[in-house]
Image: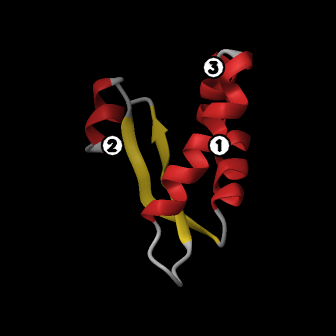
Amino acid sequence: MVWATVVETAGLEVGQLWEGKVVFAYNTAGQVLEHLLKSGAGTAFHDAIDPRRRRYLERRFLQILARRREPGQQFEVVHDCVSCIARKP
């Protein structure tokens, strides 16, 4: 996404804009699940799941995630970030 265009479409001028990524590395699938559940999107998803099926679905998620990792590698959770200073023209 071109963030400057989004800002300008909102009727603002971009003063400064930074884009980047924050990468979190974890050794276990459980640590990944904990990280995701503490994020806003993960919490909303978790809360939307039928509480009676939550434990089963968490176990399935952990199993699938564990199978995707190559031996000896860490799990990576990547958050894309954008920061902008904008002003009214």
Q: Report the residue marked by disc 1.
A: 59
User: Mark 3 or mark 2, which has the lower sequence index?
Assistant: 2
User: Mark 1 or mark 2, which has the lower sequence index?
Assistant: 2
Q: Report the residue marked by disc 3.
A: 49
From mark 3 to mark 2, how far is it between C-alphas?
A: 32 Å
Of tags 1 and 2, which is closer to the observer?
Answer: 1
In front of the other: 50 or 80: 50
Identify the residue shown where x is 57% and y is 42%: 60
| The label number, if any, that marks residue 3 in the structure image | 2
Amino acid type, residue under disc 1 in the picture = Arg
SS category of the residue bearing label 2? helix
Q: Quadrant of the C terminus?
A: top left
| The label number, if any, that marks residue 87 in the structure image | none
Q: Position of residue 61 (x, y in %)?
A: 56, 44
SS category of the residue bearing label 1? helix
Amino acid type, residue under disc 2 in the picture = Trp
From mark 1 to mark 2, how far is it between C-alphas?
A: 37 Å
Q: Is residue 72 left or right of residue 53?
A: left
From mark 1 to mark 3, how far is it between C-alphas?
A: 14 Å
Identify the residue shown where x is 34% and y is 24%: 11
